[in-house]
Image (cartoon, helix red, strand yellow):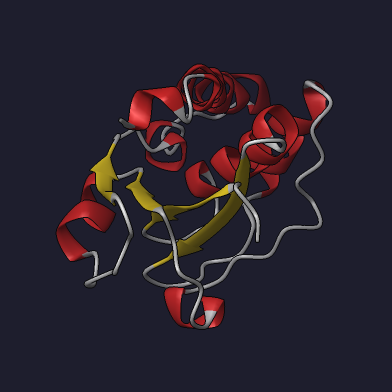
Amino acid sequence: MSNLLKILFLCTGNSCRSQMAEGFARHLKGNLIIPFSAGIEAKGLDSCAVEVMKEIGIDISGQQSKTIKDLGNVKFDYVITLCDSAQKNCPFFPAKYGIIHRGFDDPIRLASNETSKQNILEHYRRIRDEIRMYVQTLPASLT
């Protein structure tokens, strides 16, 4: 039996923030956490999220956008919602220790009016770095 915590990172579309959190948790906390990510719906993996994670040496290109239903009957220790919409629309999840909300801005929305790729990626980089700082506090910050 594993002593690793099973943590689900939940977002609306499982395309960006939850994917980055899963990648960081696997890369930085793989000795403590078994990370999962899902969305209320699956919108596909965001190419800008993949690009900014690759810039820092973390490849999330093999991850897939999935819904909660795609996870089957996994028993999570914690569910962490990463956007306000997921927090409001989160279905009941029997998490052993609880559901925690830690919202992050949506880089897709922030970048929607940008015209240059560089400006678009700056929004993604900021959110990526904020998610990294949060994941670095896990699992200690959960209690």
Above or below 130: residue 113: below
Q: Position of residue 80 (x, y in %)?
A: 36, 46
Q: Quadrant of residue 119?
A: top right
Q: Nearer the viewer, residue 84 or 90?
A: 90
Q: Quadrant of residue 27?
A: top right
Above or below 21: residue 69: below
Above or below 6: residue 89: below
Q: Quadrant of residue 125?
A: top right
Q: Position of residue 128 (x, y in %)?
A: 56, 26
Q: Position of residue 83 (x, y in %)?
A: 30, 45
Taking the spot 15% from the left edge, 57% from the top edge, the residue there is 88
Above or below 11: residue 42: below
- Residue that sits furthest to the front in the current view: 1
Q: Position of residue 138 (x, y in %)?
A: 48, 28
Taking the spot 43% from the left edge, 23% from the top edge, the residue there is 140
Q: Nearer the viewer, residue 116 or 41?
A: 41
